């Protein structure tokens, strides 16, 4: 992916829209996913499952658009003054998040099909299963889905912590690179 082809002021509007839309879906998807094992079967649990699955499918679609957008528009050069190790760590975290946010919904969807459960997309239509029912496969894929889900939660926490540190402690322009102009972004 092209990195640093744009001036360091900030991300293009399309990248900002996609970043915040995906963030607004990923954070509830993680929270609901982690809360699901503590719920009892019933309409409330069904609602949470359906929301989690629909959010996950939307994340997959948006991530495909986001990767194409990233290839098309690239990204700004690093904020001046950022230490080389910070550039390396932030690129690694961003790259991992890009990969895991595509892999995770694909595994979740495949596991869900193998389990024999439906994917009603916000009560609008059913997304058809991708594999035949297979309990052993479902169990293995859900175990992977759990590990990747927890990894995404850690990476997102690191990422948000770093963004807040730049904004509050270091007071450089890193957060402003991703904020909409209306909220003080560049
Ligand atoms: C980026 C998107 C997604 C994220 C970040 C995510 C994250 C998670 C997390 C953190 C859990 C909790 C695991 C546990 O503690 O047991 C979970 C569970 C689950 N997810 Fe996802 N998920 C995503 C997409 C999907 C999709 C697209 C589907 C299906 C269409 C799905 C179906 C499920 C199901 C059925 C469970 C419960 C599994 C179990 O009971 O072991 N997820 N997800
Ligand atoms: C309050 C929440 C968040 C804040 C304040 C935030 C802030 C930022 C900032 C400032 C950047 C630009 C970094 C730079 O200039 O080098 C960025 C990039 C990025 N963020 Fe976030 N973020 C948040 C949530 C998330 C979430 C939940 C995810 C995904 C799980 C995510 C994934 C990414 C990725 C992949 C990039 C790299 C974009 C690219 O280079 O194409 N962010 N974020």
Image: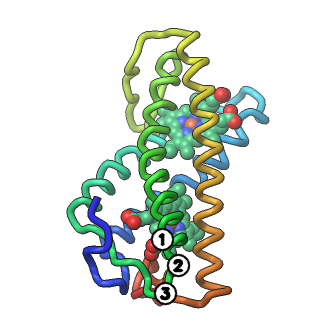
State the SS at label 3. loop
Check the image and report above or below for 116 versus 177. above
- The residue that label 1 is drawn on is 87
Q: Earlier in the sequence, mark 1 or mark 3?
A: 3
Check the image and report above or below for 98 versus 135. below
> In percent of the image, x 48 and y 10: which residue is there?
133
Q: CA distance from mark 1 to mark 2?
A: 7 Å
CB contact under 8 Å: marks 1 and 3: no
CB contact under 8 Å: marks 1 and 2: yes
State the SS at label 1. helix
Residue reaching furthest to the left: 72
Instruction: Characterize the local packing of mark 2: few (<14), some (14-19) or many (20 or more) Cα atoms within 10 angstroms.
Output: few
State the SS at label 2. loop
Residue reaching furthest to the front: 84
Which quarter of the figure has residue 17? Answer: bottom left
Instruction: Characterize the local packing of mark 3: few (<14), some (14-19) or many (20 or more) Cα atoms within 10 angstroms.
Output: few
Instruction: Characterize the local packing of mark 1: few (<14), some (14-19) or many (20 or more) Cα atoms within 10 angstroms.
Output: few
* Residue 151, numbered circle: none
User: Between 162 and 64, which is closer to the camera in this rendering?
Assistant: 162
Q: CA distance from mark 1 to mark 3?
A: 10 Å
CB contact under 8 Å: marks 3 and 2: no
* Residue 83, numbered circle: 2
Which quarter of the figure has residue 4? Answer: bottom left
> In percent of the image, x 51 and y 31: which residue is there?
108
Check the image and report above or below for 142 versus 52. above
- The residue that label 3 is drawn on is 81
**In x, y percent, where is residue 75?**
32, 71
User: Between 32 and 71, which is closer to the camera in this rendering?
Assistant: 71
**In x, y percent, where is residue 144?**
58, 29
């Amino acid at each position: 992916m092209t990195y640093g082809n744009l001036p360091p002021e900030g991300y293009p509007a399309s990248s900002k829209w996609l970043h915040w839309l995906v963030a607004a879906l990923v954070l509830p998807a993680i929270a609901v996913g982690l809360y699901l094992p503590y719920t009892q079967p019933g309409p409330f649990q069904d609602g949470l499952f359906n929301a989690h699955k629909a959010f996950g499918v939307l994340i997959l679609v948006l991530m495909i658009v986001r990767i194409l957008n990233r290839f098309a528009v690239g990204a700004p050069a690093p904020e001046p003054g950022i230490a080389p190790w910070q550039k390396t760590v932030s690129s690694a975290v961003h790259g991992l998040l890009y990969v895991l946010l595509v892999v995770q919904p694909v595994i979740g969807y495949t596991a869900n099909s193998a389990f024999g459960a439906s994917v009603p997309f916000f009560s609008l239509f059913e997304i058809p299963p991708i594999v035949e029912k297979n309990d052993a496969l479902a169990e293995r894929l859900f175990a992977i889905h759990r590990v990747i889900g927890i990894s995404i939660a850690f990476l997102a926490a690191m990422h948000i912590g770093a963004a807040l540190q730049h904004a509050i402690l270091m007071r450089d322009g890193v957060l402003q690179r991703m904020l909409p102009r209306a909220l003080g972004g560049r």
